Image (tube, grey):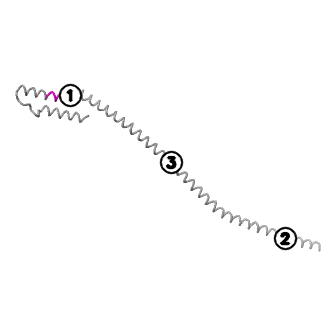
């Protein structure tokens, strides 16, 4: 029994030593965990700050590229608008010319004299008035009704063009 007690005493001493060793290891693990946590907090802040800086830099680059593309698109659109405007202006001029020609043809078909024809008629009436005045020995009328009417028609015809 003595040997048994010696063995028990020895095993309890070794168990206590093992328990102390386990406690010490657990304490070291705990301290290592605390150290890692503190390091992570310290480094995490630095990493976060670095990520913010990189994000800001990337945002500036992206904004600059976007602004450049917007500027290019704006200048292209302005150029296209100018081209379209000049083409439209040319088309309006052509359309106006065609319209004037067709109106002139329609008026001619209806028997409405042109401004040139009215001018010729006015000149002819004036000439006839002078001839009548020479033959009759009287001064020609200054404002003959035919002349006034012809001028009114001429003004209306020229304002239509």
Please say if the residues under marks 3 and 1 sit with CB atoms less than 8 Å apart: no
Query: Secondary structure beneath disc 2?
Result: helix
Residue 1 shows up from this direction: no
In the rendered image, the vertical position of residue 113 relative to residue 79, given as above or below: above
Residue occupied by mark 1: 117
Q: Earlier in the sequence, mark 1 or mark 2?
A: 2
User: Which residue: 24% across, 27% down?
Assistant: 108
Quarter where residue 158 is shown: top left
Residue occupied by mark 3: 68
Q: Is residue 69 left or right of residue 83?
A: right
Residue 78 in percent (x, y) is at 43, 43
Mark whose residue sits in front, 3 or 2:
3
Query: Secondary structure beneath disc 3?
Result: helix
Query: Secondary structure beneath disc 1?
Result: helix
Magenta stretch, residue numbers: 116-125
In the rendered image, the vertical position of residue 73 relative to residue 54, given as above or below: above
Dividing the image into 4 quarters, which one contains the N terminus?
bottom right
Label 1 packing within 10 angstroms: few (<14), some (14-19), many (20+): few
Residue 10 in percent (x, y) is at 90, 71
Residue 160 in percent (x, y) is at 24, 35
Residue 42 shows up from this direction: yes
Quarter where residue 104 is shown: top left
User: Which residue: 95% across, 72% down?
Assistant: 3
Q: What's the distance in space between the residues labelled 3 and 1, CA to CA? A: 63 Å
Please say if the residues under marks 3 and 2 sit with CB atoms less than 8 Å apart: no
Mark whose residue sits in front, 1 or 2:
1
Please say if the residues under marks 1 and 2 sit with CB atoms less than 8 Å apart: no
Residue occupied by mark 2: 17
Q: Earlier in the sequence, mark 3 or mark 1?
A: 3
């Amino acid at each position: 029994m003595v040997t048994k007690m010696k063995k028990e005493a020895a095993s309890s001493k070794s168990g206590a030593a093992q328990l102390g060793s386990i406690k010490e290891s657990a304490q070291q693990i705990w301290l290592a965990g605390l150290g890692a946590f503190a390091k992570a907090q310290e480094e995490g802040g630095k990493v976060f700050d670095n990520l913010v800086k990189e994000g800001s830099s990337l945002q500036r680059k992206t904004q600059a590229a976007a602004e450049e593309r917007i500027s290019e698109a704006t200048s292209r659109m302005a150029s296209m608008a100018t081209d379209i405007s000049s083409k439209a202006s040319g088309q309006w001029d052509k359309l106006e010319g065609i319209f004037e020609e067709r109106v002139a043809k329609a008026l001619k078909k209806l028997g409405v004299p042109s401004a040139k024809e009215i001018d010729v008629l006015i000149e002819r009436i004036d000439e006839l008035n002078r001839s009548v005045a020479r033959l009759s020995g009287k001064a020609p009328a200054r404002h003959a009704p035919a002349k006034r009417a012809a001028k009114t028609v001429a003004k209306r015809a020229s304002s239509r063009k």
